[in-house]
Image (spheres, rainbow, N blue to C red):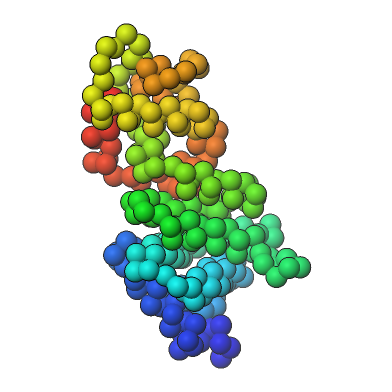
Amino acid sequence: MPEDGNSGSAEDQRLRVIIDCGAEIAGGVVGGALGFLAEGPAGAAAFGAGGIAAALALRRMGHEVSERLLGPRERARIGGVLAIAAAEIDNRLKNGESIRSDGFFDQKPHGRSDADEVAESVLLRSQREPEEQKIPYMAHLLSSVPFDDQIGAQMAHQIIKAAEQLTYRQMCLMHLAVMKDAFGLRNGDYRGVSSFPRDLTQVLYECLDLYHRAFVNFGGSVVFGPTDVNPGQMTVQGLGAELYNLMMLDTIPMDQLNSIAAQLK
């Protein structure tokens, strides 16, 4: 059997170790990820060329990063992203979805595919991400792009860079923007309010930052500062909507939103 498919090779042993290191973050999906990812092409062969291409792209980047000098938390983050992304791709293929066939996985003359570059970008950013609550959503992003041929390589890199710059609270705010009616957020700005608790000030500045990046709007009103934020009118838009969908921010647990929503009522 070729080395790329030999689960006993040194490379595959390192890959297994780094995926196992991600169990703290990835939880119970590690077993499925190993079946799809660490067994080489045989693990994904049932899904045809698309499944094999997706598995090999993750394997290549997993092998590459596993050879680098990583701290314990870096190994956990990378392993978590690889495990979650591999398990999600495996599950979507089993549910009958098709991998994109627009050349995303094709090797270019310089030897790397768009899929390789996108996977490396997500893994490197996840490696350095101290807010580990973001890690599963970086993995969702990595597993989403292979199924969406409307997201070209350059747009994927732009989205990955934007995802890296978000705080976890901003990700929660984007979910809250979609769920605002359920939480009864304040329907009005803060002009004329004389004093602000520090917690509210922090949240308003995070909302303002999302607005300046054009990820959200506030019902068409121009927002010059934090007192212009109108929580009840906050809506995800543009690149923010792409982030919301690709990172599956709708899966952020509701209990993560409660304390933020309480500040914005």
Residue 103: image x %, image y %? 69, 60
Front residue of this view, candidates 43 and 128: 128
Quadrant of the image occupied by residue 192: top left
In the image, is residue 125 above or below residue 255?
below
Q: Is residue 88 visible?
A: no
Q: Is residue 226 visible?
A: yes
Quadrant of the image occupied by residue 98: bottom right
Residue occupying the point 64% across, 60% down: 114
Q: Residue furthest top?
A: 192
Q: Quadrant of the N terminus?
A: bottom right
Residue occupying the point 54% across, 37% down: 239
Residue 152: image x %, image y %? 65, 50
Residue occupying the point 50% across, 70% down: 65
Q: Is residue 93 left or right of residue 249?
A: right
Q: Is residue 49 left or right of residue 253?
A: right
Q: Quadrant of the C terminus?
A: top left
Q: Is residue 103 left or right of residue 71?
A: right
Front residue of this view, candidates 113 and 125: 125
In the image, is residue 109 above or below residue 207?
below
Residue 227: image x %, image y %? 37, 17
Residue 171: image x %, image y %? 39, 40
Q: Residue furthest right?
A: 109
Residue occupying the point 48% across, 15% down: 221
In the image, is residue 7 above or below residue 188?
below
Q: How many marks?
A: 0
Quadrant of the image occupied by residue 102: bottom right
